[in-house]
Amino acid sequence: MMSLPQGAKTLALAMLAASALTFAEYRTARSSLSSAVVDFANVSPTSTFDRGNYDTSYHNHRAAVVGGHQARSQVPVPMEYSNYVELAEFADVVAALRAHRHNMQNHHAMHQRGQQHEYPTRSQHGLEGERRDDANLGNSAGLHQEKQNDNDGSSIQDVDENHVIEKAAEKVNIGDRGEEDNEELNEMDNAIEKSWKDAVERTNPEMKSQLQQQPGLLKVRVPFYWHVPRAGGATLSTLIGECHSLVQATSSLTSPPVFARKRDGDGALESRFRDPTLYVVRAGGQLFVNVDLDDVDGVARASSGKLIEGGSADVVAVSDVRLGSLLLDFQNRDGVGHRNQPRPQPQPQPQPQRQRQRQPPQQTQGVMFALFRHPIDRTVSLFYCKKHDKYSIHYDPSLETLSLEDWVVSPSFVPDYMVRTLVGKIWPSAPLLQVDLDVAKEILRRKCVVGLLGEKGESMKRFERFFGWDVDVSRDHNDVVEQRAAPEASRWKNVKDEECRDRLLYWGWINKNKHPTVEEGSTVYRLLESKNRYDIELYMYARQLFYEQYMQLGFDEDMT
């Protein structure tokens, strides 16, 4: 990560210090923070990749859909997003490995061509030179010397022959090193494989990568899912919990299974969400940390309970990524963060014969990912969910007598929800500007691994690969259920049920919401377009990023 400019760094430290900014003041301070930005001007943007290198068939099939929606280059983003990883880190690794592999393949091809031909040695050329036809070249050295003098130098025939001899000798030398070259190629292939695995491991908080920003500093990456309502978030949460057995720190908006019982008056479960100590609970066959990250109070409790430092959760899901970034501020308050390690405590003087090994410091950042849905489809689905689904967290009985058109023009409707959430202008009364859209685009380009609800199968495969969830690792959950006695203990299990993902993504899709559709071109449709014009453009740009990341983040080939 780039270091902050001095002015922004001073402001950041002042705001992120516990004594300078409390969670109760967050909403008030957030409006003023929107003007305090950090411009990472020296970070190589992912958009510098050559579009001509994309997989042609994959890109051209969708070019008509995504064309024409470009973000302004190097637009500053709000300071809170400095806690999230720049995707350029991963894209640069992919580009370097791709170029390295291409060079090695070319070298290997040249080596194979050299072995397919038998080239004469210098001695063979010398013998053939002695057998040259006397009638053409003469037998004596004098005749040969006279021919050279007449031509004022070496004959054209001699020059060409010497050139051939030199080239043949080079080919012979390459051929003689066949076994040595094969060993070198094997070493380079192994290095490529290791480098790619290291790059993937950087995104998985359970795999401690040795890729270092500075000597002795380990990078820890925590997946942060931005849940946009009615865009597949509940299904994604269920898939992560059931199919991959990952522990989630989430919210009542994202994961209803754990909060439905709490909402229905389960006193025992509700008390756990007031407990200052964080631990893992089981609900609906899934594992959750006893936090609700849907509001400021929930994030404050999770932060004071050291959610990120303790390593309780494999995945964090938030409805507001700006608010969620406060969970990562512990390392800004206390120096470098130490994941899975207790805060430093006074220790007795160690015995001379027993030297304590100091744990390396760690830099912890979030890796943002999200699913996107067309804003008009999402808005229509949200309305009917709020109106009819009494078991939904979104249910609003006041909408029972309203039509879709009535709701869209009412004060309770939030236009351009995605852009407002990203830039911090949550209240509908706050006007949105073109620069807000540009900032939102830049946040997605630099910070977000993009998935599309319309490409849910492909999107889930990308998330699984990017975060290492598709790797089978034998782990055991028993030692962390409802306790944190061993933070470093294994807690995963083998996930081999391929039908689990297909069931949830396709025939068993949860939260299905059958409702009337809005015809394109109708009065209501045009009204929805006018209310979500920035969100629609952001969605189209997210589609473009989805197809660009296919190459930029290495999803187009198996680089392992």
Image: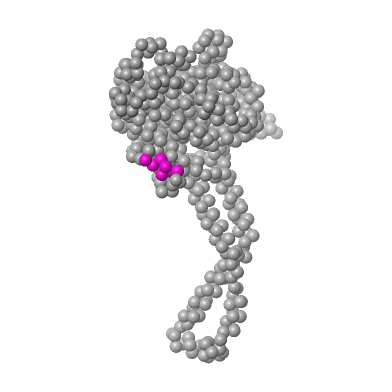
Q: Which residue appears farthest toward the right when viewing the image?
A: 353
Which residue is more in the foreground, 268 or 40?
268
Identify the image quadrant of residue 519: top left
The kind of secondary structure the magenta stretch mainly shows is helix
Identify the image quadrant of residue 503: top right
Relative to 143, is 418 on the left or the right?
left
Q: Is residue 144 above or below residue 32?
A: below
Can residue 297 be seen at all in this image of the molecule? no
Q: Position of residue 256 (x, y in %)?
A: 51, 18
Seen at 51% across and 52% down, the residue is 102
Relative to 289, is 435 on the left or the right?
left
Number of marks in the rendered image: 0
Q: Is residue 202 magenta?
A: no
Q: Position of residue 388 (x, y in %)?
A: 43, 14
Seen at 58% across and 35% down, the residue is 470
The stretch in magenta equals 58-64
Relative to 520, is 557 on the left or the right?
right
Seen at 52% across and 35% down, the residue is 461
Q: Is residue 354 above or below residue 61?
A: above
Q: Is residue 60 magenta?
A: yes
Q: Position of residue 85 (x, y in %)?
A: 46, 35
Q: Position of residue 559 (x, y in %)?
A: 54, 45
Instruction: Locate the C terminus by quadrant.
Output: top right
Can residue 319 be seen at all in this image of the molecule? yes
Q: Is residue 52 above or below residue 447?
A: below
Seen at 34% across and 32% down, the residue is 537
